[in-house]
Amino acid sequence: MLKNLCQKMFGRSLWVYHANSGGCNGCDIEVLNALTPYYDAERFGIKLVGSPRHADVMLCQGPAMRSTALALKRAYDAMPAPKLVFAIGSCACGGGVWFDSYSVIGPIEKIIPVSYYIPGCPPRPEAIIYGVAVALGLVDKKVVPVEFKEPELAIPRYHPDELRGSGELVTYEKAAKI
Amino acid sequence: MSLLSKIQETLLCLKAGRVTLPYPAQPQSAPERFRGRPIFDATKCIGCAGCANNCPAREILIFDVSQEIRVLQYLGRHCTYCGRCAEVCPEKAITMSRDFENATNTISDLGQRLELFMSTCQRCGRCFKSPSALDELKMKGYRFDDIENERWIFRSQSRLEGDPVVDDVLIELD
């Protein structure tokens, strides 16, 4: 009984570790803003810890750079086993604006496996809280890939062999689409 | 005296209310000028590739399958939401929505892909002003971006087949 109550009360409280591997500090400020009493992420049990050995979740900002990729990998390996990685910001999700420059390796998913992506440059604090809520199962994710195809192409092609005259009216038997 | 001040403080605290946002329980909308995820309207898009040429993050890829079909792909992963694509679009087919709840566990959820029908002028094909020399260098004839590797390709570089484009930088990890 007490165990069940404890699991219900204390389960899923994520301790987060805040790793910046070469970002511009914009996403760092938004993450710290999400931890302030105005947004109050601590009501979900989220707490900022200083060491990856205490953490369940790594919040990554910034792309994987040549100089910091090894440190990021070591910080990920230092976390205890059920671990989540959040890629926060466009740099961590896809490499950022300078994704093809010399010193940037790319998104952090090239170095460490990423569980959740929060795009934005920087994402709003609400967006970060929303991502955490998606991970906790409080809300459902909203984005779906959009694909549009022309149902059929607009120019019909007529063959004179297919013309059939019926009285004054001339009909095409089959109008083949290109 | 001190008791009175304590009571006064308590009354002030009762009046003060709460500042914490009840965010995931109640919806919260972004401010008016916030630029969120761009929405591509396929019915208005004419496939001019102005957005792809102006994107600072090279996020929008154009691939001409044939002369009639042009694939426009928005990746969504390193978009900085600057709004230049919406600004440059002549048909106002791109709108910057105020949609910020984009968190996902699959990065390909953020993409948008349009397959557009490009009708060509059947008479002479010379309806448009000829581009400048710099524009010709950038895009002449068809345009082929590398959609599989999700890379933007200049026309002057032919890196379509053979060369690995993404994995050209390898580092040693222990």
Image: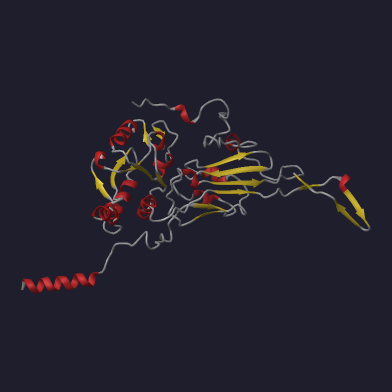
Q: For this rendering, which residue is in front, A82 or B12? A: A82
Quarter occupied by residue A108: top left
Q: Count of labels shown?
A: 0
Q: Name the colour scheme.
A: secondary structure
Residue furthest to the left: B1
Q: Position of residue A9 (x, y in %)?
A: 27, 55
Specify the quadrant that holds the N terminus of chain A. Answer: bottom left
Q: For this rendering, which residue is in front, B29 or B26? A: B26
Q: Position of residue A125 (x, y in %)?
A: 35, 53
A70 sits left or right of A107 in the view: left
Instruction: Name which residue lies at 25% across and 53% down.
Output: A6
B24 sits left or right of B150 in the view: left
Instruction: Name which residue lies at 51% across and 50% down.
Output: A144
Instruction: Name which residue lies at 26% across and 69% down.
Output: B17
Quarter occupied by residue A90: top left
B168 sits left or right of A86 in the view: right
Q: Position of residue B136 (x, y in %)?
A: 61, 36
Q: Position of residue B109 (x, y in %)?
A: 49, 47
